[in-house]
Amino acid sequence: MLVIGAGVSGLTTAIIAAEAGLSVRVIAADQPQQTTSAVAGAMIGPVLYPPDDRRHGWGEATIRELTGSRAVPGVTIPRGRLVARPADFLPPFADHLPGFQLCAPEDLPDGFGTGFWADIPHVDMPVYLDYLVHRLGTTGVAVEIGRLDSLASAARLARAIVNCAGLGARELAADAEVRPVRGPRVVVENPGLDTFFIEAPLGEEWISYHPFGDHVVLGGRAIDGNENLTPDPSEADAILAACAEVEPRLAGARILEHRVGLRPGRPDVRLEAEDVDGRRCVHNYGHGGEGVLFSWGCAADAVSLLSA
Ligand SMILES: Cc1cc2nc3c(=O)[nH]c(=O)nc-3n(C[C@H](O)[C@H](O)[C@H](O)COP(=O)(O)OP(=O)(O)OC[C@H]3O[C@@H](n4cnc5c(N)ncnc54)[C@H](O)[C@@H]3O)c2cc1C
């Protein structure tokens, strides 16, 4: 089988298939560290979907895989605050989250009316992607760099395909429902933070910071339809200033990294099989801002669909 893409979706799909004994090839236009996946925050959770929603299952599958008995490089489970500006804005199922505790009034920064603490897994994506590449490599599979111009050309290379092209699926699968949702990754030196903070609901702009040992990943922006990959220094300054209003220790923190990623936005994740020139093609793309969270669940479903 051929997996197209080596972001978190492609690598995870390839690992599940290869570890199940399938013969796997991975072709990707970009190295894993150059993908949108490398730019993600990344929080895995909170999973606040109803239990019968398929996204609930995907998220829980990833959390189980990454927080089970085996330590996974890049994965931590920090405690942090999830806050909203309106009062009484507690989302459904929040009280099911591990470590749930309502914020005391002194835990709410000025301007915020609701908040709670929870323990939410986080992934340091550059470290984690290296781990995925290494884990795939132990099955004898290496990522080949190359751009496929159509699913038909992919179908000439293997008996089955899994399309994990992220935003690239817009052209590859001629899917006009896929849209870029721009977001910068701003990383600063950690001035001593050990809890995360995120404002909800996520609109175009929000305040968030996520400590990972010696560095902190700051959020957030999600600009629908914008595909400008050039980092804007004034945007990084504005993000840092907004975070410093909530956490004064961040004021003036040294910026270590500033990149931009394009989330593969779509009204719904595309996870289904179709026939391409007599070959089975499973699509696994369009995960928007939750592709890391959904990765292990979607990958398992994609591999099942290869033979369903
Ligand atoms: C700022 C930011 C913060 C985020 N935070 C989070 C978070 O906290 N939690 C979370 O779960 N998600 C988060 N996300 C979303 C997450 O990054 C994406 O949903 C996820 O990375 C999508 O992964 P993917 O593997 O499907 O796509 P990508 O990572 O984009 O990988 C696509 C792959 O397909 C390849 N490709 C594309 N077209 C072709 C082609 N024609 N031929 C060959 N190869 C091709 C590319 O080269 C690449 O290898 C965030 C995103 C951003 C930008």
Image (spheres, rainbow, N blue to C red):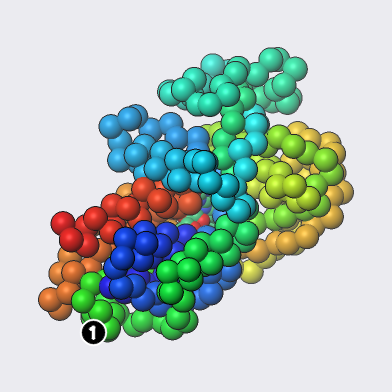
> Which quarter of the rendering shows the C terminus?
bottom left
Q: Residues within 10 Å of mark 1 (few under 14, many from 20)?
A: some
Mark 1 highlights which residue? 156
Quadrant of the image containing the N terminus: bottom left
Quarter holding residue 166: bottom left
Residue 127 % position (x, y): 62, 59
Position of residue 53 in the picture relative to residue 88 (left or right)? left
Q: Give the x, y percent position of residue 160.
A: 23, 72
Q: Secondary structure at mark 1?
A: loop
Disc 1 Cβ-to-ligand 1 distance below 8 Å: no
Residue depicted at x 36% and y 76%: 25
Rendered image quadrant of residue 232: bottom right
In the image, taking residue 304 as reference, residue 101 lies left or right, namely right
Residue located 75% across and 47% down the image: 213
Residue drawn 71% across and 34% down?
Answer: 195
Question: Camera-side residue: 110 or 216?
Answer: 216
Viewer-closest of 248 and 80: 80
Can you see residue 184? Answer: no
Amino acid type indicated by mark 1: Arg
Looking at this view, name the residue that lies furthest to the left. Answer: 278
100 or 170: nearer the eye? 100
Residue 212 position within the rendered picture, expressed as x and y whole percent measured from the top left: 70, 47
